[in-house]
Image (cartoon, coloured by chain):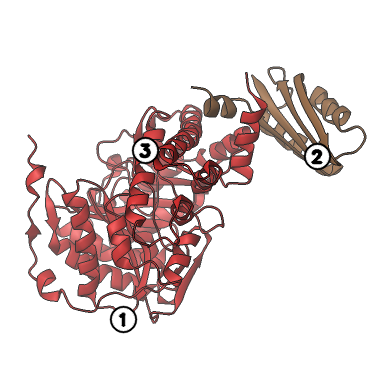
């Protein structure tokens, strides 16, 4: 029996509190596309994606209509292209990027992820070429997203890869300088990258995955915010329960949509990602949840504790609502994509250092952070190395999506529009870590990685 | 299977008759209605059996919505599963 109260609650979550399904992401393996001829490889990639994902958008739209809940994005993630391009050169990789873009246009999806490499322990000559091709690939395409995994808790940190990523990020910023360095918004550097993440820019289809798979990412900061506001002046145990119950309901919708999409497309269901993903829209902010919990501003002392509790409660509530949970599963704290975060930075309450501390207790990392365009490459490498260390030592995913916006300085901002939002330029420390970064090699895996 | 139809808007004569007529035309059998008018504001939740629909569900949603727009109302139909999934374990 459906009760009126439940109907009204669901409808108010969707209409007033911005509850939506952020993405249905179809993972597609490209391992069976390999060829030593770049043109053959690209033809096979195009055919496979456009065949497998042919009905993805249509199916998403039907589900949206059936349940009356917006499904904001339909996306595709593919096998990291570095794994299928071992026999081709840099021009070949660029061809793959264009092929991915064409396939995305043909299928009508919003983003395609997997222009990626996994180099946490070392890199082959081919992987190096692929990574060096990233700036051009991002500059010449719109929907292609790229990621590079530079460390795992098991393997340690590949500092040579981090040094390379400093250059790649600066180059991507320069090549997309006419568009506020947007290339960097489509590029993530990871530690302990998950292989089933449905969220961009870091999505790719891992090697342990089936041929195709459906992963779903929910979103619902506004719903959690409203539930906290309704809970009033309760203690933190009660508040944790309120968040858990809300996360359960949000995730159940994700599970419903995932099962429905999986059945309609005849593609196995992979995971539901429990992340609270904000958007720049008013009422859809993770920072505002933290402020609703009792902080004067996000960035105040106490923010890390608040976020730790939120993140844990979201997982506890969500895990029972879905048969398989995976991906990143935690609260996202991107700066440009969250109206509350932007406001906290603008009022001087939230610094890079505080954001870094926050990433120790939530997913994912230093995300969508714009910094001055003239920042030294080594400083970017230092930011990455710090963030990646947090992930490696704490056995969790961390990531860096940093935008050294060409020609911009502290006080300016970049505006990407849409889900990517607006980012005020944040100051970095200018003391140089160049000698440390320049040593190269690997930072050994931490002692607690030896678990066998 | 059932659909939950919500109708909200400024009260006027014949809202229930209109929505019910549209449901009958599309093959949806109304099994429950809860309705109230607060001042001039009309709100109704209907539960309709959709096993005998003569159009697909997406079209049913669109037709009700279009009908609502003609009458200055918001009419939204949603499959019952979203409520069952969210509120029942």
Please tell me how crowded label 2 is: few (under 14), some (14-19), or many (20+) other residues with Cα within 10 Å.
Answer: many
Element assignment for label 1 = loop
Q: Looking at the image, do the residues carrying marks 1 and 3 touch, with CB atoms under 8 Å apart? A: no
Q: Residues within 10 Å of mark 1 (few under 14, many from 20)?
A: few
Element at label 2: helix
Relative to A177, is A59 on the left or the right? right
Q: Residues within 10 Å of mark 3 (few under 14, many from 20)?
A: many
Query: Nearer the observer, disc 1 or disc 3?
Result: 3
Q: Give the labeled residue for mark 3.
A: A315
* Residue on which disc 2 sits: B68
**Which chain is red in the picture?**
A
Of labels 1 and 3, earlier in sequence is 3
Name the colour assigned to chain B in the rendering. Answer: brown
Residue A12 placement: quadrant: top right
- Where residue A360 appears, as percent x and y from the top left, is 26, 53
Q: Residue at x 80, y 39 (%)?
A: B68
Where residue A347 appears, as percent x and y from the top left, is: 45, 71
Q: Residue under mark 2: which chain is it in?
A: B
How far apart marks 1 and 2 lie (CA) works out to 56 Å
Q: CA distance from mark 3 to mark 2?
A: 40 Å
Q: In which chain is the residue bearing label 3?
A: A
Above or below residue A317? Residue A426 is below
Q: Are marks 1 and 3 on the same chain?
A: yes
Quadrant of the rendering where the C terminus of chain A is positioned: top left
Q: CA distance from mark 1 to mark 3?
A: 39 Å
User: In the rendered image, which quarter contains the N terminus of chain A?
Assistant: top right
**Disc 1 target residue:** A374
Q: Is residue A47 visible?
A: no
Q: Is the C-beta separation of discs 1 and 2 under 8 Å?
A: no
Where is residue B2 drawn, in percent x and y? 66, 21
């Amino acid at each position: 029996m459906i009760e009126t109260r439940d109907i009204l609650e669901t409808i108010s979550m969707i209409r007033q509190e911005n509850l939506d399904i952020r993405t249905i992401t179809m993972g597609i393996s490209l391992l069976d596309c390999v060829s030593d001829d770049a043109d053959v490889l690209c033809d096979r990639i195009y055919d496979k994606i456009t065949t497998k994902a042919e009905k993805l958008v249509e199916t998403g739209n039907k589900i949206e209509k059936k349940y009356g809940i917006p499904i904001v994005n339909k996306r595709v993630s593919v096998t990291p292209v570095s794994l299928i391009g071992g026999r081709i050169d840099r021009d070949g990789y660029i061809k793959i990027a264009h092929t991915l873009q064409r396939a995305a246009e043909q299928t009508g999806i919003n983003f395609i992820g997997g222009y990626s490499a996994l180099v946490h322990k070392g890199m082959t000559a081919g992987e190096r070429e692929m990574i060096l091709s990233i700036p051009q690939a991002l500059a010449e395409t719109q929907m292609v997203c790229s990621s590079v995994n530079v460390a795992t808790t098991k393997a340690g940190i590949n500092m040579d890869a981090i040094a390379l990523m400093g250059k790649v990020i600066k180059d991507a910023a320069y090549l997309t300088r006419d568009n506020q360095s947007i290339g960097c918004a489509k590029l993530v550097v990871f530690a302990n990258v998950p292989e089933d993440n449905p969220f961009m820019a870091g999505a790719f289809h891992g090697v342990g995955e089936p041929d195709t798979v459906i992963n779903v990412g929910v979103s619902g900061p506004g719903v959690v915010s409203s539930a906290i506001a309704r809970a009033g002046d309760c203690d933190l145990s009660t508040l944790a329960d309120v968040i858990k119950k809300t996360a359960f309901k949000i995730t159940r919708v994700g599970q419903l949509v995932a099962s429905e999409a999986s059945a309609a497309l005849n593609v196995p269901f992979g995971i539901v990602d429990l992340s609270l993903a904000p958007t720049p829209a008013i009422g859809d902010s993770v920072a505002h949840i933290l402020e609703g919990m009792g902080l004067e501003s996000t960035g105040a002392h106490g923010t890390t504790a608040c976020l730790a509790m939120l993140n844990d409660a979201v997982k506890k509530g969500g895990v029972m609502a879905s048969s398989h949970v995976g991906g990143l599963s935690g609260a996202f704290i991107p700066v440009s994509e969250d109206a509350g975060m932007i406001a906290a930075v603008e009022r001087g309450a939230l610094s890079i250092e505080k954001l870094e501390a926050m990433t120790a207790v939530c997913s994912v990392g230093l995300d969508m952070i714009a910094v001055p365009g003239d920042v030294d490459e080594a400083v970017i490498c230092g930011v990455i190395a710090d963030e990646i260390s947090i992930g490696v030592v704490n056995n969790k995913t961390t990531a860096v999506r940093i935008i050294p916006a060409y020609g911009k300085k502290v006080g300016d901002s970049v505006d990407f529009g849409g889900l990517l939002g607006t980012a005020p330029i944040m100051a970095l420390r200018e003391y140089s870590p160049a000698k440390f970064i320049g040593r190269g090699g690997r930072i050994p895996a931490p002692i607690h990685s030896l678990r066998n | 299977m059932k659909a939950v139809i919500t109708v909200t808007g400024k009260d006027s004569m014949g809202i229930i008759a209109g929505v019910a007529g549209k449901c009958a035309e599309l093959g949806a059998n109304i099994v429950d209605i809860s309705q109230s008018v607060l001042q001039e504001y009309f709100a109704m939740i209907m539960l309709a059996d959709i096993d005998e629909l003569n159009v697909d569900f997406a079209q049913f949603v669109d037709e009700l919505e279009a009908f609502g727009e003609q009458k200055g109302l918001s009419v939204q139909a949603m499959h019952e599963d979203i409520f069952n999934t969210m509120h029942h374990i």
